[in-house]
Amino acid sequence: MFPANNLQQYFDELAEQDWTLIPVDLAQALKLRKSAEDKFKAQKFKPATLNRSLTPEKSIRNDSIFWLGESSDLINADDKTALEQINLLTSELKEYFRTSLNSSECHYAVYEAGHFYHRHQDLTANNNKRVFSFVVYLNESWNSDDGGQLVGYSGLEKVFTIEPQMGQMILFKSELEHEVLKTNKARYSLTGWLRK
């Protein structure tokens, strides 16, 4: 999924500015999009909650998710390949940053038209083991009028605005505040966290 021998430059950028964009293999991204769409059409997604609580907080976020790893009978070969590659990425980040990364968690997310996720941090009191967050985008032919951009913040300053276009993954430190702007059409991603 990721550049085989060229992650050093992205890790350097991550260390310097707390986020980086890594190119993703388009053929694999298309397979993941199909996997996510199939699960969504089969109604296997659930409304997202905050900190895995039982009740969705639709005023804060209203996307739907499918956790990878919890329902092994629904995980296909493409999902497993992606999880293996995320584990390899975790190992390389662990070595580069000399930090203890021991696990990852990952889900597909879909934001239907009108959906959003207000400004927040992934590193919270309830999720204080998250070190890095990532989003692999699974959307073809996306433009700015489609909305759904990921916006990152440092205090009042916007540090990035990313179109959710297929062929890229954003990797950032989990304490970085961010939001998903309201989308105007279905927006798919593979989203997760690398944990200590």
Image (cartoon, grey):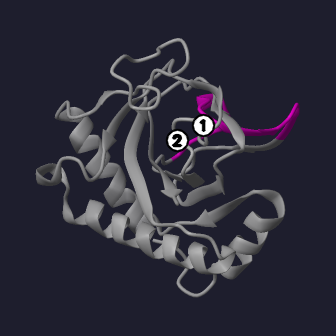
- Tell whether 171 sits left or right of 81: right
Q: Which of 24/85 is in front?
A: 85
Looking at the image, residue 186 lies above or below residue 96: above
Q: Position of residue 117 (x, y in %)?
A: 57, 26
- Tell whether 123 sits left or right of 73: right
Q: Quadrant of the N terminus?
A: bottom left
Q: Amino acid at mark 2?
A: Asn
Looking at the image, residue 57 lies above or below residue 134: above
- Secondary structure of the residue carrying numbered label 1: loop
Q: Quickly name the residue at label 2.
A: 127
Q: Quickly name the residue at label 1.
A: 124
Identify the magenta region: 141-158
Looking at the image, residue 95 lies above or below residue 113: below
- Secondary structure of the residue carrying numbered label 2: loop
Verify CB contact (< 8 Å) between mark 2 and mark 1. Answer: yes
Q: Position of residue 54 (x, y in %)?
A: 33, 21
Q: Which of 142/62 is in front?
A: 62
